[in-house]
Image (spheres, rainbow, N blue to C red):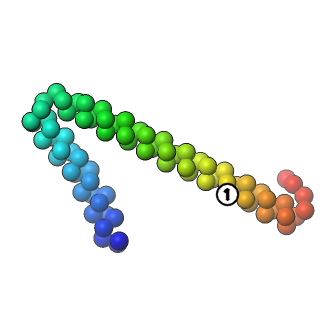
Amino acid sequence: MKIAKPMLLVTTPIGVVLGIYEGFRLAGGLVFLMIALLSMISVAIGTVVATVRRERKAEEQAAREAASIAIDGSSK
C-alpha cells in the first residue's frame, strides 16, 4: 500500500486528462458532456466527504463534552 496509493494519486488524473484529450480528438464537442459529468461527480463526492467530516467532528466534540461532564460532574 505504500507504493499503490501514490501511484493511484498520480496516474488517475493523468489518465483522466489523456481520456479527455482522446475524447476531444475522436468526438469533438461531446467531450464537453464528459467534462460536465466528471465535474458533477467530483462535486457530489466532495459534498459527501465534507458532510462526513462535519458529522464526525460534531460527534467527537459531543463525546469530549460528555467525557468532561462525567469527569467534572458539571456542564460547561
Number of labelled discs? 1
**Residue 12 found in image quarter:** bottom left
Looking at the rendered structure, the secondary structure element under dot 1 is helix
Give the quadrant of the N terminus: bottom left
Q: Amino acid at mark 1?
A: Glu
State whether residue 60 is above or below residue 48. below
Residue at 31% over, 35% down? 37
Most extreme residue toward the right is 73
**Residue 19 found in image quarter:** top left
* Residue under label 1: 60
Residue at 14% over, 35% down? 24
State whether residue 54 is above or below residue 9. above
State whether residue 64 is above or below residue 19. below
Left or right position of 6 against 51: left
Question: Residue 73, position in %: x, y?
Answer: 90, 62
Left or right position of 33 against 65: left
Question: Residue 63, position in %: x, y?
Answer: 73, 59
Residue at 77% over, 57% down? 65
Most extreme residue toward the left is 26
Question: Residue 23, position in %: x, y?
Answer: 15, 38
Question: Residue 28, position in %: x, y?
Answer: 13, 30
Q: Residues within 10 Å of mark 1 (few under 14, many from 20)?
A: few
Left or right position of 4 against 23: right
State whether residue 41 is above or below residue 49. above
Residue at 23% over, 47% down? 16
Most extreme residue toward the top is 29
